Image (cartoon, rainbow, N blue to C red):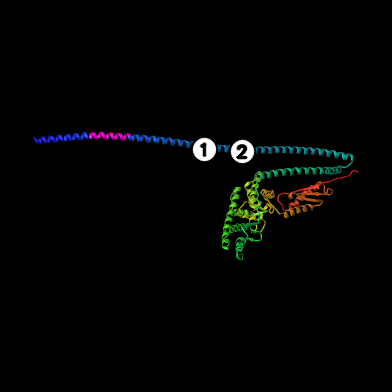
């Protein structure tokens, strides 16, 4: 019984324990659920705040993107508007050029029509005069036979002699008028082409002196250049191939040499040695070698720049190097490379006006004086030397023939040779292109006056306009008008044959008769 009671008590205690555990678990579950709910609410609140922050950032970024896109759009729109405006300006300029060219063509066509009409009228007039002359001849023949009782052959001879005398005077005046009109038209057309070429290309010309001088910081530097027993100056002269002249001129050293490249190398090397201060034979050889390498680069770059400026292609490397050497060559103080580039431009423009190949004309102009780069190494004139050089390097026969003929030393085989002669005279004759000493200038004027004064009937001759014109005074009793015209042509031909001059010389023969009487 006690055992049963104990078991029942134990069971009741276990049941109570179970009930108490269940109650405690339920209470703990309720507490835990309340905590999870609070955590969830807190997490939802945090998530809401983060989403609002992200939304605000997204709105800000979206606004920034919209602003940037708008600025980029406005920039691109502005650039495209500028491009369209530039294209419109170019189109308008082209239309203006086309209108101007069409107007010029219309004027030329109108002038040609007028010339054809005038020629037709002159031909009709000549036909009418010919018919009238035949009629007059027939009438005079009949009159002579009737009045003079001459035979027909005798009358014909007399009539022909009279007509010959009459027509000789008329033909002389007609020939003179036609000649004057032809010369005027030719001069106007030549002036138009030349003026147009000069207008399209106007280059500055810098006259470089051919003597090289180096300024020194003090006269003490002269002693350092000479060196002990002259070893420094001898080393410099041997390395460069020039003569170094040190005289009493304060703070100046003069470099003398026939080759302009060597003179330029010596000048640059001496300037660097003076600036460096270390002057000895070893240093001199080192500096000279560096300067020579730099000069070679300068020569190559000068040749490349010249053909690039003129848009000339397929030039042999050796020709390119020889062309670049002209940068250091001068003729009458005119830089030969610049003179060649200028002549190439002028020849290209004149060739375009005359319907010739511009590329060939530019090659002739650029290479016409290339022989001057090596004329101190090869015997002969620079035109022939240049032509042989171009021929060896595969240039077109038209090109090297024009180069050989631009000074009249070879027979011209194309119009490009004539253009070369004209363009060479233009670039040499324009003001400022070349200079000459007073002594040479006076000698040239004196030769011009003496040549004109050597003709029969000349009283006095005067060279004016800096030798561009010579005026010849003749005796009116010995020279008539026709002989004066012929004398002007003979003097001009003699000047072309005997004298060397740039450009052209105008010959004016003056024949004047003055009759003076005094009333008493």
Can you say whether 439 is above or below 7 in the image? below
Q: Nearer the viewer, residue 210 or 219?
A: 219
- Residue sitting at the far left: 1
Can you say whether 482 is above or below 1 in the image? below
Q: Nearer the viewer, residue 172 or 16?
A: 16
Q: Quadrant of residue 273?
A: bottom right
Q: Nearer the viewer, residue 444 or 266?
A: 266
Residue under numbered circle 2: 93
How many discs appear? 2
Q: Give the label on residue 75, or none.
A: 1
Residue occupying the point 58% across, 63% down: 281
Q: Is residue 35 magenta?
A: yes
In the structure shown, which secondary structural element does the residue marked by tag 1 occupy?
Answer: helix
Residue occupying the point 79% across, 51% down: 461
Residue occupying the point 74% across, 43% down: 184
User: Mark 1, residues whose alpha carbon is within 10 Å: few (<14), some, or many (≥20)?
Assistant: few
The answer to whether residue 30 is left or right of residue 55 is left
Q: Residues under labels 1 and 2: Cα distance?
A: 27 Å
Q: Is residue 23 magenta?
A: no
- Magenta residues span 25-41
Image quarter (top left, top right, bottom left or bottom right) of the N terminus? top left
Residue 322 point in image, percent of width and height: 61, 55
Residue 472 appearing in the image: yes
């Amino acid at each position: 019984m006690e055992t049963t009671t104990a078991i029942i008590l134990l069971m009741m205690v276990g049941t109570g324990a179970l009930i108490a555990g269940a109650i405690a678990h339920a209470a703990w579950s309720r507490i835990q659920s309340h905590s999870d709910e609070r955590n969830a609410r807190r997490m939802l609140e945090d998530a809401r705040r983060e989403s609002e922050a992200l939304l605000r950032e997204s709105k800000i970024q979206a606004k920034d993107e919209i602003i940037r896109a708008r600025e980029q759009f406005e920039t691109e729109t502005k650039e495209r508007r500028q491009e369209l405006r530039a294209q419109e300006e170019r189109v308008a300029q082209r239309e203006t050029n086309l209108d101007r060219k069409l107007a010029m063509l219309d004027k030329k066509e109108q002038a040609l029509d007028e010339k054809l009409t005038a020629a037709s009228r002159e031909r009709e007039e000549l036909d009418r005069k010919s018919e009238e002359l035949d009629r007059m001849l027939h009438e005079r023949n009949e009159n002579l036979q009737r009045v003079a009782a001459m035979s027909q052959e005798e009358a014909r001879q007399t009539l022909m002699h009279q007509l010959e005398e009459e027509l000789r005077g008329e033909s002389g005046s007609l020939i003179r008028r036609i000649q004057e009109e032809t010369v005027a038209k030719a001069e106007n057309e030549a002036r138009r082409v030349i003026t147009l070429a000069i207008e399209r290309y106007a280059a500055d010309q810098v006259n470089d002196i051919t003597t090289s001088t180096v300024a020194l910081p003090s006269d003490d530097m002269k002693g350092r250049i000479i060196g002990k027993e002259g070893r420094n100056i001898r080393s410099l002269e041997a390395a460069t191939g020039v003569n170094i002249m040190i005289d009493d001129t304060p703070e100046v050293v003069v470099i003398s040499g026939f080759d302009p490249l060597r003179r330029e190398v010596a000048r640059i090397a001496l300037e660097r040695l003076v600036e460096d201060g270390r002057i000895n034979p070893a240093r001199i050889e080192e500096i000279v070698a560096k300067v020579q390498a730099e000069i070679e680069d300068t020569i190559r770059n000068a040749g490349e720049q010249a053909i690039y400026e003129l848009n000339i292609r397929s030039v042999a490397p050796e020709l390119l190097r020889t062309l670049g050497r002209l940068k250091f060559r001068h003729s009458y103080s005119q830089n030969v490379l610049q003179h060649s580039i200028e002549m190439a431009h002028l020849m290209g423009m004149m060739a375009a006006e005359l319907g010739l190949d511009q590329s060939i004309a530019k090659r002739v102009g650029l290479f016409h004086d290339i022989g001057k780069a090596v004329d101190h190494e090869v015997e002969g004139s620079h035109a022939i030397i240049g032509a042989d050089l171009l021929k060896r390097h595969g240039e077109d026969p038209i090109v090297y023939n024009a180069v050989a003929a631009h000074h009249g030393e070879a027979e011209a085989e194309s119009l490009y040779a004539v253009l070369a002669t004209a363009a060479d005279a233009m670039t040499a004759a324009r003001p400022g292109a070349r200079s000459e000493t007073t002594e040479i200038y006076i000698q040239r004027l004196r030769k011009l006056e003496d040549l004109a004064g050597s003709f029969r009937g000349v009283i006095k001759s005067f060279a004016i306009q800096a030798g561009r014109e010579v005026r010849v005074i003749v005796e009116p009793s010995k020279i008539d008008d026709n002989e004066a015209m012929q004398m002007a042509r003979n003097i001009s031909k003699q000047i072309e044959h005997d004298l060397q001059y740039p450009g052209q010389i105008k010959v004016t023969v003056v024949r004047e008769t003055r009759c003076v009487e005094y009333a008493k």
